[in-house]
Amino acid sequence: MSSLSKDDIELRNKITQRLIDLRESTGLNQSDFAKLHDIDRQQVNRWESFESERGVTIYTIKRFCRLLKITLQEFFNDPLFK
């Protein structure tokens, strides 16, 4: 697998930061967020990891959006992505 380009890393980091920001906006830490949504805390930790070479998939982002009852458009309609 080839390494990520600088642009790819920047996008991955923006997506990761958006996941963190949205989760934090719920007032929940990773453990409480995971318990509320019946998912493993380690999964939330992986979603929010800046170290992951691959980052999250669009399917994971869509799942996360469903948990927060927002659309993909709302997820990406953030100054981070401008």
Image: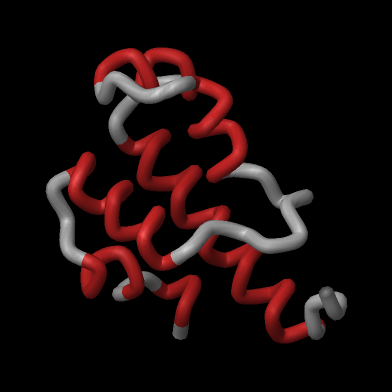
Residue drawn at x 29%, y 59% is: 62
Residue drawn at x 26%, y 24% is: 37
Residue 56 in the figure: left or right of residue 40: right
Residue 79 in the figure: left or right of residue 10: left
Residue drawn at x 48%, y 63% is: 57
* Residue closest to the eye, 9 or 24: 9
The quadrant of the picture occupied by the C terminus is bottom left
* Residue 28, above or below 54: above
* Residue closest to the eye, 18 or 55: 55
Q: Position of residue 50 (x, y in %)?
A: 71, 51
Q: Position of residue 30 (x, y in %)?
A: 48, 23
Q: Position of residue 29 (x, y in %)?
A: 46, 21
Q: Residue furthest front?
A: 1
The quadrant of the picture occupied by the N terminus is bottom right
Quarter where residue 4 is shown: bottom right
Quarter where residue 40 is shown: top left
Q: Position of residue 3 (x, y in %)?
A: 86, 76
* Residue 51, above or below 77: above
Quarter where residue 2 is shown: bottom right
* Residue closest to the eye, 23 or 34: 34
Q: Residue furthest left?
A: 69
* Residue 64, above or below 71: above
